[in-house]
Image (tube, rainbow, N blue to C red):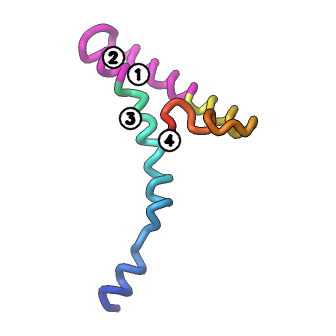
Amino acid sequence: MDKKQLLEAVRVPLGLLWKAAKDPLRLLVLSVLPFALAYSEVLPYKSAAIITVVLKGLDKFLHEVGKTTGRKELITGLTRF
């Protein structure tokens, strides 16, 4: 097997890679503000974790409502991707 055949065999379409990376990126985006507040000692870390989970749930809820109603602006949820 030459180099070209090997590259063709292991090449991953960028669309699939983006789709796989979206969920962890959403979680990262949603957790930045609560953990920044916890780092600056405005609120405890346990509260930051709870707020992140609530934001993730709200993001998923908006996504599902958008899919059900067909409203494009809701399909992307809170993170807009």
On residue 49, the disc is: 1
- Secondary structure at numbered mark 1: helix
Q: Would you name the residue on which mark 3 appears?
A: 28
Instruction: Mark 4: give few (<14), some (14-19) or many (20+) Cα within 10 Å.
Output: few
Between the residue at mark 2 and the residue at mark 3, the CA separation in whole angstroms equals 15 Å
Q: Earlier in the sequence, mark 1 or mark 3?
A: 3
- Image mark for residue 45: 2
Seen in the image, is 50 located left or right of residue 70? left
Would you say residue 19 sits in the magenta stretch?
no
Q: CA distance from mark 3 to mark 4?
A: 13 Å
- Asked whether 56 or 73 is in front, the reply is 73
- Say which amino acid is labelled 2: Tyr
Cα gap from disc 2 to disc 4, whole angstroms: 26 Å
**Mark 4 highlights which residue?**
81
Identify the residue shown where x is 68% and y is 35%.
Answer: 66
State if disc 3 and disc 1 touch (CB < 8 Å): no
What's drawn in magenta, residue-wise? 33-58
Amino acid type for the residue under numbered disc 3: Leu
**What kind of residue is marked 1?**
Ala
Give the residue at the far left of this rendering: 40
